Each structure stands twice: as C-alpha cells, then as structure tokens.
Image (cartoon, rainbow, N blue to C red):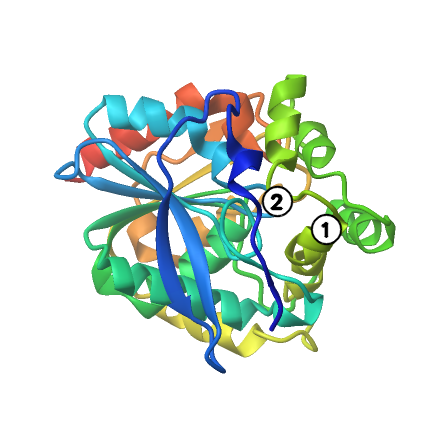
Amino acid sequence: MEILRTPDERFENLLDFDFSPRYTEIAAGNETVLRAHHVDEGPQDGSLIICMHGEPSWSYLYRHMIRGLSARGYRVVAPDLVGFGRSDKPANTDDYTYERHVDWMSHWLMTNDFTNITLFGQDWGGLIGLRLVARFPERFARVVVSNTGLPIGTGWSEAFQDWLNFSQTVADLPIGAIIDGASIRELLPAEIEAYEAPFPDPTFKAGAKAFPMLVPITPAHASVDENTAAWAILETFTKPFLTAFSDKDQVSAGGERVFQDRVPGAKGQAHVIISGGGHFVQEDASPQLVDVIDQFIIANP
C-alpha cells in the first residue's frame, strides 16, 4: 500500500484553525502503519464529544463547533478519516473500503481509549461513526446524527445519483468548491483554500474519489450485511439518540425518520430540523448545533 502524507506546511495559517495536531498510529496490515490525525480541545476532564466528518471534508469543518463546545466546558475530539485532512492517504482508490475504514477508526478509538462519548456524525461521519457505536456500544453515552444514514442497499436519492455521477467523471475533484456548493452560505476564499489544503494534487484525492462508490445503495454493494447487522444492534440502543438534520440538504432529506422510528433511544428526544442548513450544516449553523448538543447533553446526563 503506497501511502501519501500531506506536508505540514500546507496546514500553516489556515483561517480559524490553529489547533495543535494529535496523531495515532494505526496498524493497517502487511506491516503498513497509517498515521491518523485528530484535534483534541477543551478541558481533558470535560464530557467528551467526538465530531466525525464525512466526504470530502476534514476536521476543519468543525472549527467553529470545536471552539463553541470547548468554551462550554466540553472536551471536543475531531478526527480526520484516513485519506482526508492531516491523516495519511493511501494512494490507490482500491485501498479504500467501507470495512477498512470501520476497522481503522476502531483501532483509533481503542488506542486512545475514548469512553463515555457523545458522538456527532454527519455524512460519512455517521456511516462510520454509527458502525463504531454498534461495535462498541458500551463506549458511547449519547449519539447525535445529522445529514447521514446507515444504508443497507435499498436505494438512493436523485441528488446522491447526481453527486455519484459527478464525482466519478470529473478529472480533479474540486474539494473546496464542492463544500462551498453544498453549503447555503458562501464560503470565504480562505475557507475554500483550507478545504483544499490536505490535497496538494489529484494523487492525494484517492479517498475522496472512492467514497461515493462505497455507499451501499444496492444489494450488490459491499457492507450491506455489516450495516444490516449494525442496525440490529442500534435497534436495541436505548441510550439518548438525537437527530439534527437540516432543511435544505437534498441528499439526506427525510433520513431522520428511520432513526427516530428504529432506535429506542430516539424516543421522546427533542429532535430538531436545522433551518437554513445545507448538507454541510456545520458551515451554515455551527452556533445552533453547539446549542443543540449542549442542551441534549444537559437533558440526558
């Protein structure tokens, strides 16, 4: 497995992102070791919130939530998935599978021995994060999901099909422009540049290119059985579970209902729809999300 590592200077002087990097070594088989990055801010004895990003973003997406939640006394950890952000990037799209990502992030979670976690997962941060919840339910105290799902091969939206077609036909994925286009507010040029920072050239974008193809939207896709098994565990998950989807995300529209209907811990919770939020709701409504998470934890000590 050929591994690429983005030079550190690419992350210097990024707008609103001056957090110290933390690294975890992950055994990836065949003597391959991957270095995974995460941000860890706020008091170390504060209630732990893990914020997981999706495709094609990285922990920069959580910069405002990290500051807002840590200011309220929470310890906020935001990892970069392998292939994104400051984490190592396998160079071949075939190196990326859904199950490898679950295993890699499981190794990251266990190595850091995170417990009593409140998870916030959006996009692939939910697809992978919820698999971690199903694998280690004892480590999670609460869950918040936004604009995500746990698909089992039963179909997809027209908006997702458009994204799939674009992602697989464009020669060079314009990472910053994608995130800008899927947010309601117009991102600043410096923010768009920050989203591009992990990817000096197209060879670093194998993960971003691979991810759309890995979503198990048909019965023939890999990970349908594994996600089905995860759902069986989530259907017994009685700990607090909140949905906070946004109202202007066409990809995940209506996706909150399956969680509300199938996860016991979602019953009676103050589920919210974030008004004026696009797919990357963190860019459009970070202050509201901070309030939602804070109130959710307070209401479910």
The picture places residue 232, in percent across and down from the top left corner, at 40, 71
Contact (CB < 8 A) between labels 1 and 2? Answer: yes
The location of residue 143, given as percent across then percent down, is 33, 48
Secondary structure under tag 2 reads loop
Image point 64% across, 17% down: which residue? 188
Residue 28 as seen in the image, left or right of residue 84: left
Within-10-Å neighbours for mark 2: few <14, some 14–19, many 20+: many
Observer-nearest residue: 120 or 91? 91
**Side of 287 relative to 7 (left or right):** left
Give the residue at x 49% y 52%: 87
> The C terminus appears in which quarter of the rendering?
top left
Q: Locate the N terminus and report the quarter of the image it occupies.
A: bottom right
For label 1, the crowd category at 10 Å Cα-Cα, with few meaning under 14, some 14 to 19 and many 20 or more, is few
Amino acid of disc 1: Ser
For residue 89, side relative to residue 41 (left or right): right
Label 1 sits on a secondary structure element that is loop
Q: Which residue is mark 2?
A: 252
The circle drawn on residue 157 is: 1
Question: How far apart in space, not on screen, are marks 1 and 2 (Cα)?
Answer: 8 Å
**Disc with the residue nearer the chain's start (1 vs 2):** 1
Q: Is residue 72 above or below residue 301?
A: above
Residue lying furthest bottom: 30
